[in-house]
């Protein structure tokens, strides 16, 4: 890897990185450690902007890829566009700009799970194996040629957060190999079998709701809790109050507290087990299922919550 980093060819590369979320940071760090990043495209005030500023990478903050943005990118005469957890579709005008290719890090083993939510969908479906795919971006979403793939075996307690973190780590390392193969002239694109394509969707709030009188089976509820946090979340209503079901979290050391993401800032350690789901009554702090049942002994789901999954 060190040979890649020090080559004169690499120092002259111009790479544009597109990303918006805390997971995009993972890939940006990995790519930047080896290849120069000339420009970062991100939405205003994103976690990616903060990192790019720390690394002194020029940043273009925008929520739309209009003609003005495209012209600014075109002036760079880029070699690669790298897209990771970005969320916006790149137009044909953008896709033709790089010398080598526009590349996307996708969180599934394509053609399975095209679309916006492959990682949580894998958890929802109880998949044992997920993975990451690097594709050349085309004007049809997630349909481009496969440039590299790597499998990942899900853990029994995998959450959306842990899975996306791992897949972005794998994807960042994998895209380094792909860029190197392009530079060496050894890249070998493989067309997707479109007949085997499956699709994921954008989740809406109602996806996480269930009627308290007709709850999911324990296994299904467990998967939904792990897949749906932080959006749309798993929730129900009881006594005119919203009850949220939250996944197990990794409790930070004190030194990590300041760097925790906003999306899990409400989940301060309320129980002693790191693998235990939490319940949150509307207007209250999250607590363990055991503590919740102690406080609300007439809660209708007490038998379900006492299963081995919880």
Image (cartoon, helix red, strand yellow):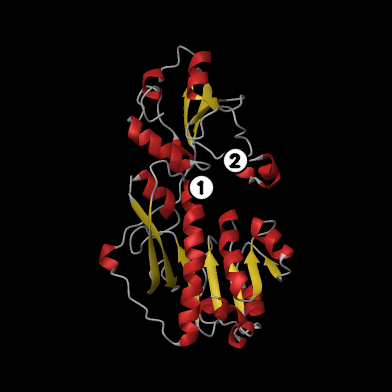
User: Disc 1 on helix, strand or loop?
Assistant: helix
Residue at 37% over, 23% down: 304
Query: Residue tagged by mark 2?
Result: 264
Q: Give the vertical position of 235 relative to 62 (above or below).
A: above
Q: Give the vertical position of 159 relative to 138 (above or below).
A: above
Specify the farthest residue to the top.
Answer: 298
Q: Give the vertical position of 23 relative to 139 (above or below).
A: above
Residue at 67% over, 78% down: 72
- Between residue 155 and residue 133, name the one nearer to us: 155
User: Disc 2 on helix, strand or loop?
Assistant: helix
Specify the farthest residue to the front.
Answer: 2
Residue at 48% over, 31% down: 276
Residue 187 x, y percent position in the rendering: 41, 82
Circles 2 and 1, Cβ within 8 Å, touching? The answer is yes
Residue 210 x, y percent position in the rendering: 41, 31
Other residues around mark 2 within 10 Å, as few (<14) / some (14–19) / many (≥20): few
Query: Residue tagged by mark 1?
Result: 161
């Amino acid at each position: 890897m060190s040979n890649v980093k020090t080559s004169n060819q690499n120092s002259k590369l111009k790479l544009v990185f597109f990303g918006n979320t805390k997971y995009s940071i993972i890939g940006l760090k990995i790519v930047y450690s080896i290849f120069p990043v000339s420009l970062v495209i991100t939405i205003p005030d994103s976690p990616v902007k903060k990192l790019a500023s720390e690394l002194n990478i020029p940043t273009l903050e925008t929520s739309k890829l209009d003609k003005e943005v495209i012209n600014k990118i075109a002036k760079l005469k880029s070699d690669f566009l790298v897209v990771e957890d970005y969320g916006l579709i790149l137009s044909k005008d953008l896709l033709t700009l790089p010398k080598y290719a526009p590349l996307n890090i996708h969180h599934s083993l394509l053609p399975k799970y095209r679309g916006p939510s492959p990682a949580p969908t894998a958890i929802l479906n109880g998949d044992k194996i997920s993975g990451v795919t690097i594709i050349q971006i085309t004007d049809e979403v997630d349909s481009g040629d496969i440039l590299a793939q790597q499998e990942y075996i899900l853990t029994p307690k995998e959450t959306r957060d842990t899975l996306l973190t791992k897949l972005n780590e794998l994807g960042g390392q994998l895209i380094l190999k792909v860029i190197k193969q392009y530079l060496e002239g050894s890249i070998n694109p493989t067309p997707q079998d479109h007949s085997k394509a499956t699709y994921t969707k954008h989740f809406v709030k109602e996806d996480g709701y269930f009627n308290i009188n007709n709850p999911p089976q324990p296994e299904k509820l467990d998967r939904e809790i792990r897949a749906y946090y932080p959006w749309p979340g798993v929730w129900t209503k009881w006594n005119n109050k919203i009850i949220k079901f939250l996944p197990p979290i990794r409790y930070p050391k004190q030194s990590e507290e300041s760097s925790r993401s906003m999306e899990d800032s409400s989940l301060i350690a309320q129980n002693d087990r790191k693998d235990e789901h939490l319940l949150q009554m509307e207007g209250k702090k999250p607590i363990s299922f055991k503590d919740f049942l102690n406080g609300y002994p007439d809660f209708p789901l007490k038998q379900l919550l006492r299963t081995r999954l919880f």
